[in-house]
Amino acid sequence: MARVWLAAVFVVLLTLASACSPTGDYQILYDQDEERSAKERHPDRQYTIAVVPKREGLDYFEAAKDGAFEAAKELGVNVLFRGPETADADAQIRVIEELIEQDIDLLAVSSNDPKKLLPVLKRASDNNIAVITWDSDTDEEGRAFFINMVDPETLGRHLMDTLAWSTGERGKFAIMTGSLSAANLNEWMHWIKVQQQEYYPNMELVEIAANNDSYEEAYASAVRLLESHPDLAGIIGNSSVGPPSAAKAVKEAGKQGEVKVVGLSTPNLMRDALHDGTVQVITLWSPKRLGYLTVALGKNLLDGTLPYDGQFVNKVGNVRVKGDMVIMGEPLDFTKDNVDQYDF
């Protein structure tokens, strides 16, 4: 197995870990004696990068998969894209354990639980496998860096704004989330609530409903929300299955236009609902671009290079770096007026 760190890279990460921890405590995942990058040790060897989504089968992660394989082809690496059938941490751990037994150089994980995955990620690093996260983070000691789609504060506040704009800045609303243990979803919810408390005093969050990134569970949650809160003004879906499920429930209940629906999903899933007025605004980024970026930065890491602020990545653009978090770009809104310009 190829070892991946230059001594200088180790020092940088050690500094980041100390700076980011309020106590100064950290765990060393990579040995300081690993002085040469994988490229230097095995110049003719093709890297294998394992990309693990929260779950298989969602349009969002399928688009990320397309981007990952596109990057693999263009950058000359092997990519394995494998995830659990459900957005479950234990199932994801089993997938990662299987990948550790294979000849992989880097593991890129969209985490279902920021703490529960730490032991298996430690095991990967002990086997000289570099570890990064993408889409959804772990605690910082579990990886080298995190590839985020957008700045989480910007996104959370923006999602609250899109609902407020749609409801006239008043009324009761609910949040439909994926897993209650997913770090990215929880951070977005935090900023949704902060934005509401700071700027929309006439709006009230009445419930947060988790659906484990399951369309069936999300639809059942949406139906129940409409029944439990007959005066509900809006729903924010902060995972890709939320808005389409909410739209279906709202339409079947005959509450189109009465209950506003906004949130995160793909334009292909939401096109019809945007055009018929069931959904007001959908926000996202390019998951295909995110998959591409994950593989590209993973390969760079194996070559001994950390991401840096302002770095240009082909087919992605210039990324931002804040501490040990890479930010791909800004959120993009889809409405009935522009949704047909996009296909993913």
Image: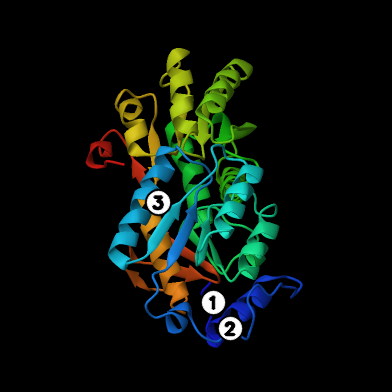
What's the distance in space between the residues labelled 1 and 3, CA to CA?
A: 36 Å
Q: Earlier in the sequence, mark 1 or mark 3?
A: 1
Q: Nearer the viewer, residue 59 or 79?
A: 79
- Which residue is labeled 1 in the image? 3
Tell which tag, 1 or 3, sits nearer the viewer: 1
Instruction: State the residue at coordinates (51%, 63%).
Output: 103
Q: Residues within 10 Å of mark 3 (few under 14, many from 20)?
A: some
Nearest the viewer among 57 and 15 is 57
Work out which quarter of the rendered image holds the C terminus and state it.
top left
Q: Earlier in the sequence, mark 2 or mark 3?
A: 2
Query: For the residue carrying disc 2, how many other residues have a C-alpha within 10 Å: few (<14), some (14-19), or many (20+)?
Result: some
What kind of residue is marked 3? Answer: Pro
Q: Position of residue 276 (x, y in %)?
A: 31, 22
Pick whichever of labels 2 and 1 is earlier in the sequence.
1
Q: Amino acid at mark 2?
A: Glu
Q: Nearer the viewer, mark 2 or mark 3?
A: 2
Residue 331, numbered circle:
3
Residue 34, label in figure: 2
Q: Residue furthest left?
A: 341
Q: Nearer the viewer, residue 107 or 127?
A: 127
x then y, percent, for residue 317 = 31, 65
Q: Is residue 52 above or below residue 317?
A: above
Report if the CB atoms under discs 2 and 3 are less than 8 Å apart. no
The residue positioned 39% from the left and 81% from the top of the image is: 43
Residue shown at 44% from the left, 64% from the top: 48
Classify mark 1: residues with Cα within 10 Å, few (<14), some (14-19) or many (20+).
Answer: many
Q: Secondary structure at mark 2?
A: loop
Using the numbered discs, state the Cα–Cα distance from disc 2 to disc 3 in whole angstroms. 38 Å
Q: Residue placed at 51% from the left, 74% from the top? A: 2
Query: Can the viewer see residue 308?
Result: no
Front residue of 288/78: it is: 78
Disc 1 marks which amino acid? Answer: Arg
